[in-house]
Amino acid sequence: MDRNKDASASDVPLLEVEDLKVHLNTPRGTLKAVDGVSFRIGNGQTLGLVGESGSGKSMLVRSLMGISPSIAKISGSVKLSGAELVGIPRKQARAVWGNRVAMVFQDPMTSLNPVVRIDRQLTESMREHLDMSRADARTRAVDLLKLVGIPEPEKRAKQYPHQLSGGMRQRVTIAMALACDPDLLIADEATTALDVTVQRQILDLLQEIQADRGMGMILVSHDLGVVAGRTDEIAVMYAGRMVEHSPTQDLFAHRRHRYTEALLAAVPRLDVPKDQRPRPIPGSPPDLVTFKGGCAFAARCTAADDVCRTERPVMTANGNPRHLSACHHPVAVGGETEAAEVEGAVKTAEVEEAVKAAEAEDTEATDVSEAPETSEAADSTAEVEEAEEAAEVEEADAPEPVETSETSEAAEAGDAADEADDEAEAEAEDAKPSLSKEVPA
Amino acid sequence: MTAETSPETGEPTGSATGTATAGDTAVSDDVLLSVNDLVQRFRVPGGVVNAVAGVSVELKRGRTLGLVGESGCGKSTLARAILQLTTPTSGSVVFDGQDLTKLSKDGLRTMRRRIQMVFQDPISALNPRRKIKDIVAEGLVISGTPTAEIGPRVADMLRKVGLDPDFVSERRPHQFSGGQCQRIAIARAMVVNPDLLICDEPVASLDVSVQAQVLDLLDEMKGSTGVSMIFVAHDLAVVRNISDEVAVMYLGTICETGDTAAIYDSPAHPYTRALLDAVPAPDPGASHSGPALKGEIPSPMRPPSGCRFRTRCPLATDRCAEEVPQLREVAPGHRVACHFPLVGDDVPKEAAAAG
């Protein structure tokens, strides 16, 4: 597998994201779902985007597709082959979304319209973007179904989504995404809802198609195992920011950020002895509305000290100029110098002290913060409802799912609605201090 | 149709005698649950689905059985049939000496306190309109626990699953994350001190970081209460640490069963091998050890003749189409239903290359 091609093969990268921010205005304040993310993807390259629920990874890729919720304020720069996408009129942007950039979603049942036949769903975007005749589009639809490995494509094209299995449905959504030969394919947790055996089939398929067509691809997942052997680079997100970004090999060999390490230790794996159990990450991510300074992972990190709690770490290269991480106390793993190990040992002692101190602080903090936070939790309940309402409104805004390419958009709006729900849920969770060991603001 | 009825009747009988000779009488005293030749058939438009087509498993007290297979293999149906949530078509479920399939409604109600279940989607498994303390207390109320005892027991159980009772008791499920809801679901199941806990894909809908939390909690529960467990999952990696024994299911039948170590270190069924190969390794250097499994699980309405796995098996021959493989022992306690079991590591590679 030749996965280490030079990223800067051509001068203009396929996708260039600079300081992208997606801020949501909620009644509680601004929720910084994505807070200053920069990366680029070369032609034919695959980026793995990894993080927990609520890390902002879905919000990030949705803003690239133009399907972030209506309350989202997007700033920064997104350039596709050099052309700016942020802030351009919606009409212009629509020529890009679904055409040059396409997306595959987590749940194929909600991204497919249940009352429209498969071929009709496939031909919509072709008719819209490629100006194809009905007959041509239909022929191409069957070809695409064949391409994604659906047996009896002619018969399947005439069926409805519920007549297909989960794996087959996901193949259909991949065919839909490929309909206009996109330059960039985004797979947002595309295999999370599938069986491991089917997951492997779908990942193999995506990889094959990506290589055949020389597309750029973003593989979004919460599981480092899924992206390990199938990406050129990996970006790890936490609390709306990128915390580590590196060529894939280098990330696994010399991971630096404590969060990356914790995430890796949590993956159940078969290639280690049985007694090496998956290690949970205690606590939960911080509230993205109230979170202020310091490292966002500090409250859950075993190596955190006072610097981590006050000073926000920035992405810096250390050794390999393409391996960036934002951690005050990066991990020293195999391949590092002895000096680093000695330093590590000293640090461990320091860390233990710091953890003890932090624990003492936590206990106090929990008692004190309980009363006021309770009311806040009630607030966030209201917020859940509000976010749901907002999502519903957006859904209603989407035009009737007939004739034109609006169907996929309606489905996407539905997804965006789900996302808004998720975000709101994440907040609701964050408002419970005694359940998670957080250092209160 | 004749080919399909034979595994239901023939196969389990053979396996039952197999266990009887292998295990001595002292061990059989320890058996908490024994499922014999269980068949669960559903009538659907256009035919009959044999969701569980003759399954026999045994669970000893204090042990955990991992039940693994793809969607549609019947593992959840089996779990539900054990609990008599559906009425099994035939076969018996003997729990602590009593056949659950023959119990009256009242008898079942008493028995259900001793068998509890945790479901895949914790958020839909909890009643959104009830407070956490009432959700957890429900089992105690139904089993007639004195009111004075209920409060303290609920609080105690919530603490055990890592939640602060003062904080969560008055809240409702939507105020919690998936992981926390799963803790609540586990508290609800464990508060009545069950002898058997059936977990149906309890971590499939959770983030990896939270999965490990829930698995640790279940392991802790097992250690502190000695509860026996059936752990249903589609991912062999998840089941490995928590199970003492593993049973692999395919299309309504068991294709391999044995100690966890045996299943993971020397899988004998090509399907088990394929399931192991499908687990993504978080290591970019790792090469996939075998070819990806082709196609999907066939419809249980029209299962293939002979070995049910033959349509996707890289080793299948004419014999597999004609003869139903019976569960037989390849090593002590390690049984497989395959005409060409993969004994040792060299066999599968050669054979796979040839096929």
Image (cartoon, rainbow, N blue to C red):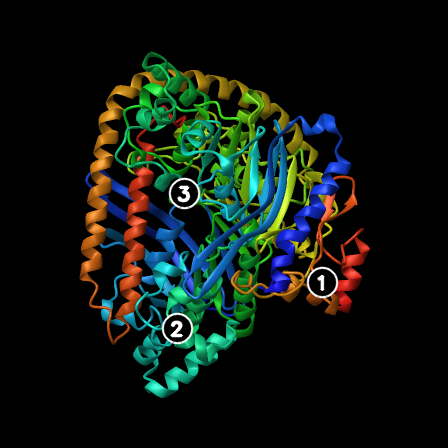
Query: Please, which residue is most extreme toward the top here?
Result: B148
From this view, report whether residue B325 is shown above or below residue A277: below
Q: Left of A73 or right of it: where is A227?
A: right
- Secondary structure beneath dot 1 equals loop
Task: List the residue tagged with mark 1.
Answer: B323
The label number, if any, that marks residue B121 in the structure image = 3
Instruction: Categorize mark 3 by other alpha carbons within 10 Å: few (<14), some (14-19), many (20+).
Output: some
Tell me the number on the disc at residue A437. Answer: none
Q: Position of residue B189 (x, y in %)?
A: 44, 29
Q: Mark 1, residues whose alpha carbon is within 10 Å: few (<14), some, or many (≥20)?
A: few
User: Separation of disc 3 and disc 1 at Cα?
Assistant: 39 Å
Which residue is rendered at x = 55% and y = 73% of the image?
Answer: A212
Residue annotated with mark 2: A159
Q: Earlier in the sequence, mark 3 or mark 1?
A: 3
Q: Amino acid at mark 1?
A: Glu
> Taking B314 as reference, is A130 above or below it?
below
Q: Is A12 in front, or is A113?
A: A113
Whole-angstrom CA distance, mark 3 to mark 2, is: 29 Å
Tag 3: amino acid: Asp
In the image, are marks 2 and 1 on the same chain?
Answer: no
